[in-house]
Image: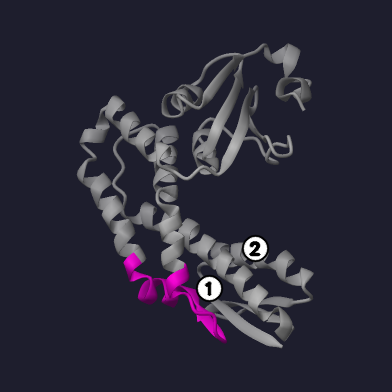
Amino acid sequence: MWEISLNIKSENTIVANVLYKSLLNSLQEMGGIITIDEDKNYISILVGVNEKYKDKAKLIITSCIIELVCTNFKMAFLDNFLVFPRKDKIGMLAFKKALLNFDKETDKYIVKKYLVLDHDLFLESFYYFKLKPLQEKWAELVSLSNENSDYLVSSDSFIDLLKFLVDNLDICEDEISVVKEDDGYKIFTLENGQYQNKVFNEESIVSSVIDLSPQKINLYFSEPSSAINLLERIFEERITINNINTKNNYNNISTIYKI
């Protein structure tokens, strides 16, 4: 049996749980054993699979760790070092999400280049000592933003930069629909006609759409809002506007989305 221990510092409980849940279903499907243990210093995720599944398990673990570093660790880096201009929370979250996803494929390549899965991996040590080139890359991005923070105080300048970042993200979804309801927003995908199992609020909807980086957006609403106005400005060429009457149409989502 091939075994590996993935170790995360105890204070990073959220990171450990994200990694554990990401690995659980995939590894169990191949008959793997995955457990989580904690002492005063580390949370250890212990993985064991039949030797014949070793290569497949390594690919799954590699993919999960890459995503974790490029999402959770990068967001922590932005939170620590980004000097954000005085903007509303909608704009702040959107800007951070755009920076998070900017040049993400190169980020993933760097993590993969330095990642070696042997018997033990200490995630923070790997990040701080092996991934210095990645941190230097992020530092350049943050430095460029911080040096221009005065310039970004202007609303038009801020929108221009945000639009530039969004336009240069890799497309992740061909088409989505964003539906504004009384209690928030729902996102539907073209692939299965199902929205993510949550309602997005005014502050988070723009950053959530940026995260999906769609080629086309169908936007449904009865009245505009700050979030809708921002979506229209940064995704202007990709958006189709659909003004609808909430009471008559929201009760039948299949009619709105034509599924």
Residue at screen point 26% across, 34% down: 152
Point out the image quarter for the N terminus.
bottom right
Q: How is the image coloured?
A: one colour
Secondary structure under badge 1?
A: loop
User: What's the mark number on residue 213?
Assistant: none
Identity of the amino acid at label 1?
A: Ser
Residue at screen point 36% across, 64% down: 134
Q: Which residue is mark 2?
A: 22
Point out the image quarter for the C terminus.
top right
Q: Which residue is mark 1?
A: 10
Identity of the amino acid at label 2?
A: Ser
Q: Which residues are magenta?
A: 112-133
228, above or below 191, in the image = above
Give the Cα separation between the discs numbered 1 and 2.
18 Å
Closer to the camera, 197 or 115? 115
**Residue 255 point in image, percent of width and height:** 77, 20
